[in-house]
Amino acid sequence: MVPQSLESAAGGHVLDTPYNEMYESAGAPRSHYRILQDRLKELGTEEIQRRQQAADLSFLQQGITFTVYGEKTGTERIFPYDVLPRIVTAAEWDVLARGMTQRITALNLFLHDLYHDAKIIADGIVPADLVYSCKHYRREMRGIDPPRGNYLTVVGTDLVRTPDGRFAVLEDNLRVPSGVSYMLSNRQVMKRVFPNIFRDYDVRPIDHYGQELLACLREVAPVSQAAARIVLLSPGIYNSAYFEHAFLARQMGIQLVEGRDLVVHDNIVYERTTAGLRRVHVIYRRIDDDFIDPMAFREDSMLGVPGLMNAYRAGNVTLANAPGTGVADDKAVYAYVPEIIRYYLKEDPIVDNVETYLMTRPAERDHALKNLDKLVVKAVGESGGYGMLIGPHSTQTQRDEFREKINAHPRNYIAQPTLSLSVAPCFLEGNIEPRHIDLRVYILFGAHARIIPGGLTRVALRKGSLVVNSSQGGGSKDTWVLNDSPDS
Amino acid sequence: MMLSRVADSLYWMSRYLERAEHTARLLDVQLHIALDVAPHTATVGWFCLLNSLRFEMPAEVAADAGAVTRALAFDPHNAGSIVACVGQARENARQIREQIPSEMWEEINNLYLAVREMSIDRLWQSGPHAFFHSVQRGAQLVAGLSDSAMNHGEGWQFIRLGRYLERAIALAWLLDSHFGIKGADALVEATPSDFVSWAGLLRMATAYESYCRVHTVELQPRRILDFLLLNVEFPHAVHFCARQVDKAITGIAGWTGTSRTAQGHRLAGRLNADLAYDTIDEVLANDLDKCLNKVVTTLAAVHDAVYNQYIGYTVGAVLQGELAGAQ
C-alpha cells in the first residue's frame, strides 16, 4: 500500500514546499507515475520488500560493493539502492538534453579561449583574477591544441529540481566525474527486479554508454580512429572508484592500466607488455591532474607517468579529459556560466544556474554573512559534500567558523540559497517515504555531444537530509527517461 | 601479449604460494621427526632444515624448535616466513583480481585470513600439524584452481613458471643440505637409525609414498637422490620441475612471438636436456654439489632472462631491438 505520508513534504524546516516528483497534489499522481502507483498497489509492501532484497543480493553477488577496510572479515557493503524508479518525461528530458548540449559546448569554447587568447577576460565578462587564482588553472595548458579543440570528453552535471518544477544546474563535474557504473548497474538490476513495470513504460535504453564513450575517445585520437589504441588509466586497486574503472574498461573492451604500466620515450606513450612496448594514443584517465605526471605536476605522485605532459604537448597522445578543465567547474567560475553561454553562443541558457553569491563581491558577501543561517556555503575547491555549511541545519559555532573563513579567504567560498530539492518516493524498511533527490546527467563529447538518456538519481536517505553524496549517507535509484508520456 | 605488470603479479603470486607450501611442509615434517629421534639428531635436523631454506639464525637458537618455527612461520619481518609469503601472494593476487577466477582469489584470501589469525602460542595449543597441513592444502587448492578454472593461456604459463621454478630451486637446496651434511658416507647403505631422517627427506618432498611404490620401503640414499633429482614423472623431482619451466617458457614465447634463441629459452631447454640425459652415476662422478649448484644458478639466470625479456626491460633496449628488427 502507498501510505498517505508519501504525499506530504519531507522535513519540517522553513524551506519552500519541495517539488514532489510523483504527486501533483494529495492523492493525485502525475500522469507518468500513475502506472507505477497502480503496480505498487497491486504488488503490496511484502512483495516490494522481497524484490528490494533480491536487488540488494544481486548487487552483492555482482561485487558492486565498497570494501570496508580495517575489518578482519573484509566486509563489503553495497551502495544503497532504492528499487522505486525516478521517471522523467520526454518533454522534460528534451529541455535537459538541449540545455546540457548548450552548456558543454560553451564550456568547451570557454576552456579553449582561456588557454589561448583569453578574449572573454579581455572583454570583461569573466574577471582575470578569478581565473588565474583558481588552483585548477594549468599554465602548462596554454597554447596547446587538443584534437578537435576538445577539452571535455566526459562531463557529469548535477541538476536539482526547484519547487517550481524546473531543473537547475547545481554544479558541473568537468574533471573526472564518477558514478556512471551505478547508473548502468542500477538499470540491469531494475530490469530483473521489476520486469513488468519496466515493460509497462517505454523507457529509453542506456546500455550503449560504453560504445558511445569509446566512440568519443576514438574521435579525439591524434591518429586515425581505426588505428587508435585506447586505454583507461586508473590509480589502482586502492582507489575507491576502482570498481568503476574496471567496469568501464570491461564495458568498452579496453585495457585498464596503472601509471607504472605506461612509459614515455621521445614523447611517445607506450604500455609495457610481455611482447614489448605498444604505443598508446588515447588515455581515458581517471586520475586527477595533480597526479598524472610527476614531472609536470606533483613530483611526489607515484600514480602518474613521468613525461606524459610532454607527450601530450607534442600532440602524440590525447588525455580525456584534458588537464586544466577544473578551472571551468570551480564553484565561483560556475556563477559566470550563464554569461559564458551568452558570450560564446549568443543564446540564453536553456537550463538555469542556481542563484549564487560570490564572496569576492562585497555586497553579496555582506548579504551572505547576514544570512548564514539560511544559506548553503560551499568551498570552491571541494566536492563530494565536504567543506559545506548548510545554514538551516548549522550551529552558531559552525556559522562563526565559516564567517571567519569567508572573511579570511573570500575567493575560496560561495553561498547559495538552501535549495528545497525535489522529493521522490523511496522504499525504506518496508515503507514508502519521500526523500530528497538530485540528478547527475552524463554528457559525452567527441565530434559532437552525446547524452545518454538517463542518469544517476542520488537520494538523501536520511529523513529531511539534503545531502545526496554517497560519502555522506546517500543512495541511488534508477532513472527512467520515457519516449513518450504513457497517457498520451 | 599481456601487461608486464599483470604477468609479474601472476608469477610472484605463484612463487610465494609455492614457497609458503614448501616451508609449511618442512616444518610439519621436522616437528614430527623431532619427536622420534635423539636430541642430537633433532638438532642436526633443524640445522639441515634452516640450511635448505638458506635461512640463517644465531647458533644458540637454531636448534630450538620454538624459535625456528616462530621465525619461519610467523615472523613478518622475515621475508621467507609463511605469513610473509602468503601476505605477498595475496597482495599480488589483489593487484590482478580482475584477471584471475574469483574462486582463486577467495581461496588465497581465506588462506591469508587463516594464517594471519594464527600465532605461535595458539599453534602449540591447537597442534602444529593441523595448521601446517591447512597451509599446504590452501596453496594446493589455489594451484588446483589455476589448472582447472583458468584459461591455459599466457597468464597461466606465468603461474606455472613461478610454481616450478620456485619448487626446483627449493628441491635443489633441500637435496644439497641433506646430502651435503651427511657427506660421502651418506651414499652407502642407510643404517636403521638413518631411516627416520631419509623418510623425512622424502616426506619433505611429498615423495615418501611415491618412492615406496617404485623402490619399496628399502630407503637407499642413492635411489632417493635419483628419484628426487632425475625422475621425470614425479612432480616434486628437480627434473620434472625443470621440464615444466621449459614448457612454460616455450608457451610464453609462443604467445609473445619471442625468438627460440632468446636467453631464457636456451637456458631452460638445456637444463631440461641435461637432467634428461644425465645418470645418477655421472652426477655423482662429477660431484653432486656442482650439479645442484648448476640447477640453482641456471634457474636464477632463467628468472633474470624472463625479467629482462618480458617484465623489467629497459625502454631503450626494446626500441633498439625493434629498430634492428625492422632493418
Image: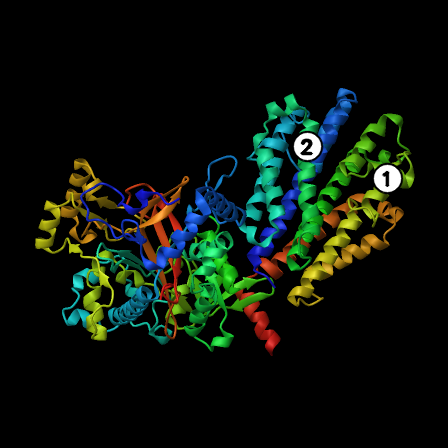
- Relative depth, front residue between A48 and A66: A48
Q: Is residue A414 above or below residue A488?
A: above
Is residue A3 left or right of A132 when viewed as pictured? right
Of circles 2 and 1, the one toward us is 2
User: What's the chain of the residue with tag 2?
Assistant: B
Q: Which residue is mark 2?
A: B132
Q: How is the image coloured?
A: rainbow
Q: Amino acid at mark 2?
A: Phe
- Relative depth, front residue between A488 and A421: A488
Q: Amino acid at mark 1?
A: Tyr
Q: Is residue A106 above or below residue A362?
A: below
* Helix, strand or loop at mark 2: helix
- Relative depth, front residue between B1 and A199: A199
Q: Can you give x and y, in whole percent of width and height, for residue B92 in the image?
A: 57, 48
Does the rendering let one see residue A478?
A: no
Q: Which residue is mark 1?
A: B211
